């Protein structure tokens, strides 16, 4: 299997992001998304850490990762792992669930990360690959896939995790990192902010956030980099502005979290406005995307 990654945004669905990837060696570090990550395995088998355990995703299985949930990703064995993902905003699933129930019930909750449903997995792959569909066909296919996913596999409804539920020390450290992400931050200063010993801070932060403080800093820097890239900022300027040593450092960290390089992300995203929470009708059929191989 040849390593390849294709990333694009679909104007017919309000700029929703899509990823088609085949990896033999690439592994994702622990990270999270601000959107859902939904998809299916096409060939091979993947594995990822999610909610305290290792999940495997063979063909016929669905990948269902909730916003804000730390996870990894890697191929299993030497044959590689080919899969397709799309990234709907939580509001898209909330509205789909509301239309199914005809009443507000919050964002659907999916606890397992991997769901065995060969029929729905095939539907997801067909929806993902339907590049030539009209806007109405595309929107209809998305609603059908989300409706089946919610009806068959949702574990209930929830609101997004409200701020302030973490321990105060962890919240203060996160706020400190998010305010000073572009600077060099030492563990000792984070410990002073938290009022904990460095050892206690790392253990507490890891347990509640799912990442140690240095990895959370990298995640924040990559998220800020994505926002700057979307505005057309040159990559060299992005790397310096968010605190990476150089552009190579940005590229390594970005690819380990996003799955594609900043260059490909820039070619796709800088030409497209920030995606709204719902898809735009009549947006046209021009797909904005690019591919990388290695």
Image (spheres, grey):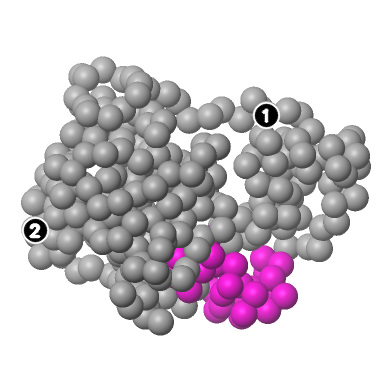
Q: Name the residue beneath numbered marker 1.
A: 166
The location of residue 183, given as percent across then percent down, is 78, 62
Q: Kindly identify the residue that appears in the image at 18 percent across and 44 percent down.
A: 118
Relative to the observer, which residue lies in front, 59 or 164?
59
Q: Which mark is residue 90?
A: none
Q: Residue at x 22, y 29 (%)?
A: 152
Q: Nearer the viewer, residue 287 or 292?
A: 292
How far is disc 1 from disc 2 in space, using C-alphas? 45 Å
Decide which of tag 1 and tag 2 comes sooner along the chain.
2
Magenta highlight on residue 260: yes
User: Looking at the picture, does residue 234 appear above or below residue 260?
Assistant: below
> x, y percentage for residue 115?
30, 38
Tell me the residue at 46%/71% (across/down).
25
Determine whether, in the image, residue 275 is placed left or right of residue 129.
right
Could you tell me how many numbered marks the image carries?
2
Q: Which residue is mark 2?
A: 134
Q: Nearer the viewer, residue 190 or 71?
A: 71
| Residue drawn 43% across the image and 52% down it | 47
């Amino acid at each position: 299997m040849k390593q390849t990654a294709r990333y694009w945004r679909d104007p017919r669905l309000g700029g929703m992001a899509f990823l088609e990837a085949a990896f033999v060696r690439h592994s994702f570090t622990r990270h999270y998304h601000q959107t859902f990550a939904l998809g299916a395995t096409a060939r091979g088998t993947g594995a990822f850490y999610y909610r305290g355990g290792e999940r495997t995703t063979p063909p016929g299985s669905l990948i269902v990762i909730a916003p804000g949930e730390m996870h990894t990703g890697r191929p299993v064995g030497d044959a590689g792992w080919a899969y397709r993902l799309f990234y709907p905003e939580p509001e898209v699933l909330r509205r789909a669930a509301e239309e199914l129930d005809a009443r507000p019930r919050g964002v659907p909750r999916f606890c397992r990360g991997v769901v065995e449903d060969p029929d729905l997995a095939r539907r997801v792959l067909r929806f993902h690959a339907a590049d030539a569909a009209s806007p109405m066909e595309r929107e209809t296919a998305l609603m059908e896939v989300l409706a089946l996913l919610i009806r068959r596999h949702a574990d209930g409804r929830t609101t997004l995790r409200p701020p302030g539920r973490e321990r105060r020390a962890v919240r203060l450290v996160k706020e400190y990192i998010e305010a000073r992400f572009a600077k060099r931050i030492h563990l000792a200063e984070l410990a002073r902010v938290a009022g904990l010993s460095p050892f206690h801070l790392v253990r507490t932060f890891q347990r509640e956030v799912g990442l140690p403080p240095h990895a959370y800093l990298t995640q924040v820097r990559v998220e800020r980099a994505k926002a700057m890239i979307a505005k057309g900022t040159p990559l060299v300027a992005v790397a310096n502005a968010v605190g990476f040593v150089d552009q190579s450092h940005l590229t390594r960290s970005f690819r380990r979290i996003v799955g594609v390089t900043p260059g490909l992300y820039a070619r796709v995203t800088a030409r497209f406005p920030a995606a709204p929470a719902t898809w735009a009708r009549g947006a046209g059929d021009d797909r904005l995307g690019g591919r990388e191989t290695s």
